[in-house]
Amino acid sequence: MSTDVRRLATVLAALLLASLAAAPARAADGTGGPAAGQRIATALRGSPVYVDEAYADAVPPARQRQLAERIRHTGLPIKVVLTPLTKGDAFDGDSDVLAGTVRDRLPEQRELVLITTDGDFPDSLRGFEWPADTHQARDAVAAAGFLEGMRDAGLADLTAKAVDLVAEGRGRQRHEEALETLDGSAPAGARASERPASGPSSNTAGARWLWPLVAVPALALIVLAASTLVRARRTSPAVPQLVFAAARAADETRLRSQAEAEVIALGEATRAADASTPGLQSALDAYATAGKVLDEARGLPDLAGVLALVKEGRDALDGTPGLPLCFFNPLHGAAAHRTAWRPLGRRDRLDVAACQECTDALRNRRAPEVLTDRGEGGRTVPYFEVPAGRSVWAATGYGSLMTVSAGLAQDGRCRS
Ligand SMILES: [Zn+2]
């Protein structure tokens, strides 16, 4: 009896720890750097310019005040975040993650233009804005690095120029002009055409301020590493990790039984259907494919794919193809609306189907709750961020971008 009580107490303690750790762990999966993001957002409420200590020499307080004044003159909701980005840091060295995290923590900011350091090219800046394309900020900021006189400019000057170009509102044209003038310059031109949407700067733009950065903050890095270690110890004790794994396994077991039941039910429905039903062959194909994917399913993303295939089979039988499952997380069930959605850091919009909850989240500029998968290096990422060549789920969006049956046929995985 007393051992039972003790066991129960242990389980409860583990669950409590898990619930305490749940919020930051989930944030780290999806958006990254919750504490760092919060600190930056808080600072941005006081001044539109946030400069990390590592850049204090490149953009000293006097220049920061000038930048803030310049931004006020534009009358635009511009904010600047200059912070070093390195793989494995709070934002995993990704300016998209930095921008998204800061944006999420400024919910009162209906409109926002964010100018940040670039994780890929440390001598460059990136532009982001919500709602998208209002001020052509992405192109305007990208153009700043290409402009005559900006090649050797310091970070403060580069940022000031970026603010000016955003305010001018002709970023797209400025960017195109800048690329044209670069035609003779092979390396910068080549890189620009490789990554047209990411706003790269040239090899040398603003490079001068980079050098002190390499030399000076070695001590700061050591301090940072130490504090990161301490933080890691504090927020990820071993037990909750195991509890998370167990919770995901339990979800998977439950989902597997649900998927099995739905495949069986689809099989029964096809057998009960009149032989002249127009969609019968498609339904039978979807049924066969769903069974095959179920047999080989290795996790939630695959099991969600089984549900998407069952939905396609059902729709074929009914002869009334409805919307597919929710793009962001097919486990949310059938979508309620089609909506244009632009992935963070990309220029093109995707036409996706989303459930009511995710649609509401997008309308309120919140991040929808997404199904995750294992990305590069085993990192947990939204399933649609896995390269489409490696994931049929990312390629099809569970029916939003293309039917799962068609995606699997293309993929060749289910060819017999
Ligand atoms: Zn949804």
Image (spheres, rainbow, N blue to C red):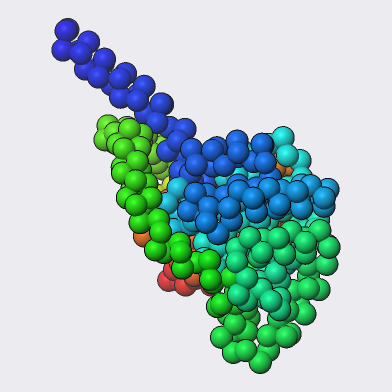
Residue drawn at 39 percent across, 63 percent down: 215
**Residue most toward the bottom?**
184
Foreground of the two, 171 or 238: 171
Where residue 292 sits, quadrant-wise, is: bottom left
**Residue occupying the far top of the picture:** 1
From what the image shows, is residue 235 above or below residue 157? above
Is residue 393 at all visible to an observer of this figure?
no
Q: Position of residue 308 (x, y in %)?
A: 56, 51
Q: Position of residue 405 (x, y in %)?
A: 56, 63
Q: Nearer the viewer, residue 31 or 7?
A: 31
Q: Quadrant of the C terminus?
A: bottom left
Question: Which residue appears at 54% of the width and 38% of the height?
Answer: 39
Identity of the residue drawn at 41% across and 26% down = 19
- So how many labels did they put on this image? 0
Residue occupying the far front of the picture: 62
Name the residue located 53 percent from the left edge and 66 percent from the top edge: 209
Quarter of the image with the N terminus in it: top left
Q: Position of residue 183 (x, y in %)?
A: 68, 89
| Image side of residue 224 versus residue 403, left or right | left
What is the quadrant of residue 152 in the picture?
A: bottom right
Between residues 169 and 55, which one lies in front from this camera angle? 55
Residue 180 lies left or right of residue 242; in this view the side is right
Residue 66 visible here: yes
Q: Is residue 1 left or right of residue 101?
A: left
Image quadrant in which you'd find residue 148:
bottom right
